[in-house]
Amino acid sequence: MDGSDGIRKGEAMKEIGLVEDALVAVDGGKVVYAGPADGAPSIEAAEVIDCEGKLVTPGLVDPHTHLVFGGSREHELALKQQGVPYLEILKQGGGILSTVQATREADEEELFEKASFHLDRMLSYGITTMEAKSGYGLDADTELKQLRVIKRLNETKNADIVSTYLGAHAIPNEYKGRSQAFLDEMLELMETVKEQELAEFVDIFCETGVFTVEESREYLTKAKEMGFDVKIHADEIDPLGGTEMACEVGAISADHLVGTSEEGIRKLGETDTIAVLLPGTTFYLNKNEFAKAREMIEGNAAVALATDFNPGSSPTENLQLIMNLAALKLRMTPEEIWNAVTVNSAYSIGRGEQAGKIREGRKADLLVWDAPNYLYVPYHYGVNHVRTVIKNGKTLFERGERVGKVSVS
Ligand code: NIG
Ligand code: FE
C-alpha cells in the first residue's frame, strides 16, 4: 500500500494504493523494492517469505496511548455498571487520580517492566509505531519518571515510540480548586521537558471539571512558543469547543471529538489538524453517541484512529478491534479505516514521512495478515489477524508468538 503523498483528507481517504501480486524486497532493515512482482528487478534473496496471496500492509501506527502507568482499575467496572459517570469517579478522587497514586508509588523499573509487557502485546497485534503520553504523575518527579520510561522503551524495544508530555491531564488533590496554579507548575516543568528532550508533543485534557477551553488555549499557545507541537483531548464527554480551539492554534491533532460541533467539523475540514478518533473509549464508557466520522470525512477532515490504551477509559492494546468499531460505530469504509491506522495516524504524530506506507527507502515495518484481502480485517472482529510482524526487516512475531528475543537490533 502506498498511493499519494501527504495527509489524506476527505475524499483522499478512499485511496489505498493497493498492488495485486506484489513483491517487497528488504535490505539492511529498509524497503528496497515495493511494487508488482512482475517487473521487479532480479534480487538474490537470503530469505524468501511466501505470503501465499494474503494481505501485506505497513505496520500499524497507534497515535494515542497512555502506555506507562502504575496499577490497574478493574474495581471501577462495578461502579460503571451501577451507572456512576466517568467524570464523577474522577471528581471523587478515583479514575485518573487513582492511577496517579499508583504511578507515583511505582519505581522506574517497575513502570518499565509493566509498559514493556503491554508494548509487546501491541507489537504482536501489529503496532510498530506509536505515541505514548505522560500524565499520571502530575508532579515534576513522576512526570519526568514516566517520560524517561517512554524514552527507554523507544531506545530498547522493537517499536518506534513518540513521546507526549501530558502534565495537564487532571488536577491533583494538592491543587484542588487551583487549576491555574497547577498549570503554572506544569508550564515550568515543560521547560525541563524541553531541555532534556523528553517529549515532542504537549497535550492537555480539556473537559468539564478538568481544564477549560481558555485555559487549554493559553497553555497550548505557550507550549508552541517553547517549540512543541501540540495535541488536545477535546470534546470527549462534554462538547466544550476544544476542537475549534485546536484548529485555531494549529494543533497537529485533536483527539476524541465525540461531541464536536458543526463549526468544529468545518474547521477540521479547512485545516490540517488531524481528527484522532477513539471509538474504543466511547464503547468502553458505554456511550451511545460516537464521533461523527462520516460528517468529518465528508467535510474534508483527515481522520486517524487510535486505541487510547489506558487503565481507565480504554484498557485494550488491540488496534484491530478499534478498526472493527470504526466500521460499525463510525461507519467508516475499509479504505478510510486503513488510512486512519497507517498514513494519517503517522502524520498525526509527526512520522508521516517515516511510517505508514510501504515505500522504497523507508523502514521495513511490514505485516503479513491471515486475511485474504483488506476488507477482511475490519470485518472479522475480536481476534488477532496478524500472521507475521516484521520490524526494521526482522521478524518479531509469528501468529502472536514471539520469534527470538524481542529487543532492539
Ligand atoms: O484519553 N480522558 C482523559 N484521558 C484518558 C483516560 C485516562 C484514564 O482514565 O486513566 C482518555 O480517555
Ligand atoms: Fe487519552
Image (spheres, rainbow, N blue to C red):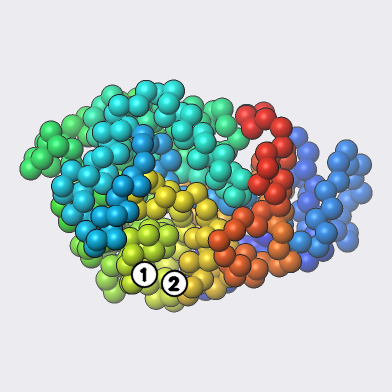
| Image disc number at residue 290 | 1
The quadrant where residue 336 appears = bottom right
SS for tag 1?
loop
| Image disc number at residue 124 | none
Residue name at image x 57 percent, y 32 percent: 157
Q: Position of residue 347 (x, y in %)?
A: 50, 52
The quadrant where residue 122 appears = top right
Residue 110 visible in the current orientation: yes
SS for tag 2?
helix
381 sits left or right of 307 in the view = right
| Mark 2 beta carbon near ligand 1 (under 8 Å) | no
| Nearer to us in this view, 63 or 328 | 328
Residue name at image x 51 percent, y 71 percent: 327
Looking at this view, name the residue that lies furthest to the left.
177
Q: Position of residue 130 (x, y in %)?
A: 50, 44
Q: Position of residue 199 (x, y in %)?
A: 39, 34
Type of amino acid at the residue the image marks with label 1: Phe
Neighbour class for label 2 at 10 Å: few (<14), some, many (≥20)?
Answer: many
Q: Is residue 101 above or below residue 17?
A: above
192 sits left or right of 46 in the view = left
Q: Position of residue 73 (x, y in %)?
A: 33, 45
Residue name at image x 27 percent, y 36 percent: 100
| Nearer to us in this view, 389 or 315 | 315
Badge 2 vs badge 1, beta-carbon distance below 8 Å: yes
Q: Which residue is mark 2?
A: 329
| Mark 1 beta carbon near ligand 1 (under 8 Å) | no
